[in-house]
Image (tube, helix red, strand yellow):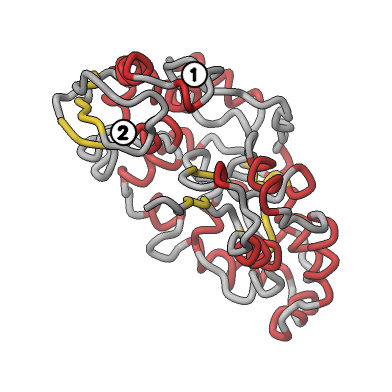
Amino acid sequence: MKYWVSLRQTGVLYAEMLDSLDPIMFHEPVGGVFEWVTAKDSGRLLANVCEENIPEVFWRRIYNIGGGEKYRTTNYDFMRWTFKAIGMDLHKVVDLNWFALRNFHGQWYQDSDVLNDYLNFRSGSIEDFIDEFKENIPSKMKVAKYIPSKFIKKFVMEREANKEMGTLHWIKNNHQDRISAFFGTTDLWRKIPTWEEFQLSEPSKIPILLDHGYDENKPHSELQIEDMKQAAEFRGGICISETMEPGDLSTKLQWCCAFGHQFKASPTLVLLGGHWCPDCLPAPWNYAEEAKKNPFFAQVWYPHHTKEEAHFYGEHIIKDTEQSK
């Protein structure tokens, strides 16, 4: 296909988003980040991509949808604002140790402006959304401010955390796969402090750029087989193909990963999309072993798995975990 595009959707804001709760709300660390986009702006984006004036260079690429700087928040701030809008104090209706320490998919995007430059879909800010949210609170939520916080905590919020996909359910039933993925260890979960001890570290606004294993200063039209071989080596594997047309990022090449799996994939998928071996990266997730052999993947694995995952929750935990290593 000549005209295709992959638009990777971020978290979507809409007025009724708290109309129904879900245990996934506790999968996101309180110190995690989101770059939101509204449902209205997402719709405008899809309408604009259908216009005839979209340039040829837009197509056959992969983009991150994001609202930009005006829609970047920490999970903690966003929860405080939305809970306050419906008359609740976040600290009184949930406990800090109900929230995971790692491995949710929230991001701020260094490159989300690129898509807006093409499609001009953004409007407003997170503050505008909170104002709209206040005006459109579902009727059943409007009574929350009249209900004692202890009741809401016990019979609404804690019930969500104890559902099968809830964090408290994993702890109580010793689901080690989930505990490992979201907390590291049960011991780290036990060390999560109370709200009174909580110290939020503000996330850096300076982008951290990954190394992709090839010369990214080259125009795409000049990329050739040597760049593919460098990229494959940086992922712990090899590019088996010996030739490619310079700049042809859509024709599939033959690759082999560090574990000996051979597969076909286009340079677009590997270099621009972040994909790699289809046998290694799906479930059952052997990420620790993958990181040992794949320097590209190690860049995002080790920062969250060698310091332990409690850096959002106060320096006393960091000291505890460093002493235990």
Going 44% across and 34% down the picture, which residue do you hit?
A: 187
| Vertical side of 275 occupied by 83: above or below | below
**Residue 180 drawn at (x, y percent):** 37, 38
| Vertical side of 56 occupied by 110: above or below | above
Going 74% across and 73% down the picture, which residue do you hit?
A: 148
Instruction: Classify mark 2: residues with Cα within 10 Å, few (<14), some (14-19) or many (20+).
Output: many
Q: Earlier in the sequence, mark 1 or mark 2?
A: 1
Q: Identify the residue position indicated by label 2 in the image.
A: 276
**Residue 262 drawn at (x, y percent):** 15, 31
Q: Residue type at mark 1?
A: Asp
Q: Identify the residue position indicated by label 1 in the image.
A: 211
Is disc 1 in contact with disc 2, using a CB cutoff of under 8 Å? no
Going 63% across and 36% down the picture, which residue do you hit?
A: 111
**Residue 1 drawn at (x, y percent):** 37, 53
**Residue 144 drawn at (x, y percent):** 74, 76
Instruction: Give the left or right position of residue 162, taking residue 48 as reference.
Output: left
